Amino acid sequence: MNRTLIIVPGLLAAVASTAAARPRSLAEQPAVRHRYELRDQRLEIAPTFEVSVAADFKHTLSGGLKLEYHLTDTLSIGALGFFGTSVNTGLLDQIVTSLPAAPDDELTPSQAQALEHANDIPIHGGVGLTFTPWFGKMGLFGRAFLSYDVYFSGGFGFAMTENDFSGEDDVTVCDARCDDATATPTQMNTDPRNDGPHNAGFNPGVQFGGGLHIYFSGWAALDLYLRDYMFTDNPSGFDNTFDKAVTDDDRSFSSHLFVGVGLSLFVPPRPKISR
């Protein structure tokens, strides 16, 4: 009897202390226990290939690197930079084919002038924030189960543009009454074909897009995304305002859409596991 009186209070005290130590409501419990936190406090290094989509005159094929540091499992800061080469679009090839070999009296550019004025993008990139609101697992044919996430990003973007024009890019050539102080710019500039394209140099702007990761393991994933770089540009390098002169006024804030695919490598290689 004495032994029972000692054991029962001890058991009651142990149960009471255990219950007090545990969370008392469902709200205090984590949403998912033992979840792999694939992004939280990890550095993402992604060799990436980008190609332009629906470009006007020059397609851009580029390779580069994306760097992302994930502050949490949903928020990260990062930078990206690409070096590329350009190829003519089908539209530019059709335009060049339809142009005369030499300039004519109708102010139609020659084939060489059209090619010299069109610009390309050898360097582009940006810095910004990335938000990853959705993540989970997907099944392939009921056999393979892969983690994935969907993200959105945006921030500062830039592009270096250049052309094959042999003269100075930012010059508007006077064509008539050049020494006449009373002549207006419209009277002095009558042939836009000999003006500089005004489309080379450093172009600041914005970049934004969205994509997804498909994880092969805890430290490697396929990165697929669509990104838009917006900056002021004049891709053709010719007179868009129809004032018979090429100036900075012919530039406009325009979209440059790219699709990218990369291999994301995460450091440290072993992700954290939630409680």
Image (spheres, grey):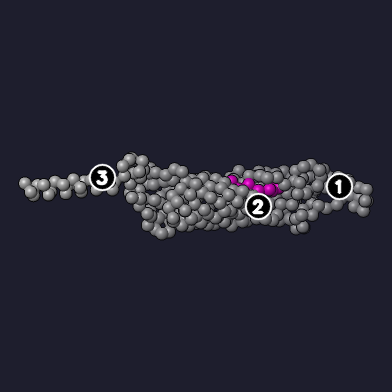
Residue highlighted by disc 2:
204
Q: CA distance from mark 2 to mark 3?
A: 60 Å
- Counting residues from the N terminus, which is met first, the one under dot 3 or under dot 1? 3
Residue highlighted by disc 1:
185
Q: Which mark is residue 235?
A: none
Task: Answer whether residue 32 is visible to the viewer in this image.
Answer: no
Residue highlighted by disc 3:
19
Type of amino acid under label 3: Ala
Q: CA distance from mark 3 to mark 1?
A: 87 Å
- Counting residues from the N terminus, which is met first, the one under dot 2 or under dot 3? 3
Q: Position of residue 244 (x, y in %)?
A: 81, 45
- Depth check, mark 1 against mark 2: the one in front is 2
Q: Nearer the viewer, residue 64 or 26?
A: 26
Q: Position of residue 215 (x, y in %)?
A: 40, 50
Tell me whether the residue at label 3 lies in contact with that at label 1, contact meaning CB atoms closer than 8 angstroms: no
Which residue: 31% across, 44% down?
A: 23
Please give the range of residues in magenta: 227-235
Q: Position of residue 275 (x, y in %)?
A: 33, 50
Outermost residue, left side: 1
Indicate the quadrant where residue 91 lies. Answer: top right
| 263 inside magenta stretch | no
Residue 153 left/right relative to 249:
left
